[in-house]
């Protein structure tokens, strides 16, 4: 892959994370350079590649006007790391991740050349669209599946400081995301509802679509954004850091320092990610806050989210199971 020409690490492209349901592609396609499109349908088990190819010809090429459309699909990490396999991504202008199960995208592509080339496309000013599972894969800390309690995995490094959930209000996933954030206290949660996209370009995010995006923090604070509303990621990251630090510093003295050390390491990693991917000054972020509503910043964190040894063991047992055994329909 060519060297990144953007030294700040802030991509100049546009990332559309669509919450599933009806996807109106027209507003997105109007902004895309139609030189070359890559479709990645791997989130769907046994995708109908013949049908996808016919749609590419009849719709994306004949109607929309793309010069070229390539379908990229594999269930082999070895192939996903092959230079020949990822070659279509190196001059692509638009990548579209279909919906399905995000654990499949993480299993086969996270940490491979496919992920690196998708990031490279954003740095070149291209557009990435992911719907449903294709939205969930965008966050480095990824929800793999789970109806009430999420099983976590590793996604793409497109949203390093957030956790993206989809079908948010339609499938009543606020409780699931809240539990995730109490474990990942330095992260910000973005609950994207159906028919709606969280759009990211550089350091700015905004909402497009018929419903909303809910921004959530570890202390259960939420804010809902609707079509056309914008926000600055630095504000949200600063608040998440403040919450996380407050929780870590107020851990009960009779507990071991294991949890505190774990949170401190998480905080340090997050600051490194911010510095690398968003070119913010960590010291500047730590000193910022959204407002003065911080008196009860820790809240009921310990009583509601501290895991017993048995709960941790149950979580480890769940993580070891095969995805097909524990990811029933509508839990991805």
Image: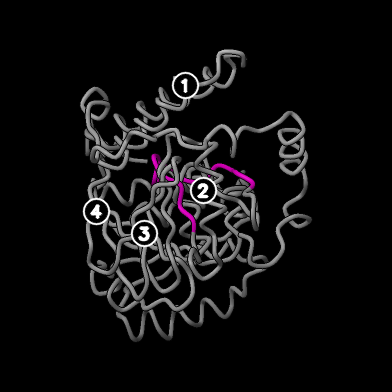
Which sits earlier in the primary sequence, circle 1 or circle 2? 2
In this rendered view, identify the residue nearer to me: 220 or 97.
Answer: 220
Which sits earlier in the primary sequence, circle 4 or circle 2? 4
The answer to the question of whether label 3 and label 1 lie on touching residues, with beta carbons closer than 8 A, is no
Does dot 4 land on a helix, a strand or a loop?
Answer: loop
Q: Residue at x 34, y 66 (%)?
A: 36
Q: CA distance from mark 4 to mark 2?
A: 33 Å
What residue is shown with label 2?
A: 178
Q: Residue at x 24, y 35 (%)?
A: 289
Percent coordinates x, y for residue 112 in the rendering: 52, 42
Viewport quadrant of the C terminus: bottom right
Q: CA distance from mark 3 to mark 4?
A: 10 Å
What residue is shown with label 1?
A: 250
Q: CA distance from mark 2 to mark 3?
A: 27 Å
Circle nearer the viewer, 3 or 1: 1
User: Is residue 305 at least partly visible in the picture?
Assistant: yes
Q: CA distance from mark 3 to mark 1?
A: 40 Å
Percent coordinates x, y for residue 209 in the rendering: 33, 73
Which range is magenta? 151-165
Which sits earlier in the primary sequence, circle 4 or circle 1? 4
Give the vertical position of 259 relative to 225 (above or below). above
Circle nearer the viewer, 4 or 2: 2
Q: Which mark is residue 128?
A: 3
């Amino acid at each position: 892959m060519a060297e990144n020409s953007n030294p700040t690490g802030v991509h100049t492209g546009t990332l559309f994370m669509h919450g599933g349901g009806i996807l109106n592609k027209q507003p997105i396609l109007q902004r895309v350079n139609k030189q070359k499109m890559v479709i990645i349908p791997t989130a769907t088990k046994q995708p109908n590649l013949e049908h996808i190819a016919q749609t590419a010809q009849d719709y994306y090429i004949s109607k929309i006007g793309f010069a070229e459309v390539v379908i990229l699909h594999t269930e082999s990490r070895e192939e996903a790391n092959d230079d020949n396999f990822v070659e279509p991504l190196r001059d692509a202008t638009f990548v579209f991740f279909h919906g399905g199960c995000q654990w499949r995208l993480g299993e086969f592509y996270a940490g491979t050349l496919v992920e690196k080339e998708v990031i490279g496309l954003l740095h070149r000013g291209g557009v990435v669209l992911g719907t449903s599972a294709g939205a969930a894969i965008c966050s480095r800390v990824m929800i793999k599946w789970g109806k009430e309690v999420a099983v976590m995995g590793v996604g793409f490094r497109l949203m390093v400081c957030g956790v993206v959930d989809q079908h948010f209000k339609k499938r009543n996933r606020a409780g699931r995301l809240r539990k995730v954030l109490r474990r990942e206290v330095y992260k910000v949660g973005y609950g994207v509802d159906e028919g709606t996209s969280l759009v990211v370009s550089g350091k700015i995010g905004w909402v497009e679509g018929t419903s909303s995006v809910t921004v959530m923090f570890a202390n259960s604070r939420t804010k809902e954004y609707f079509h056309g509303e914008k926000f600055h990621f630095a504000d949200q990251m600063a608040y998440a850091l403040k919450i996380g630090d407050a929780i870590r510093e107020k851990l009960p003295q009779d507990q071991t320092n294991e949890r505190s050390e774990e949170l401190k390491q998480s905080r340090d990693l997050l600051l490194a990610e911010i510095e690398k991917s968003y070119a913010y000054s960590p010291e500047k972020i730590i000193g910022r806050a959204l407002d003065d509503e911080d008196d009860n910043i820790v809240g009921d964190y310990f009583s509601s989210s501290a895991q017993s040894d048995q709960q941790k063991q149950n979580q480890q047992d769940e993580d070891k199971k095969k995805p097909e055994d524990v990811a029933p329909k509508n839990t991805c």
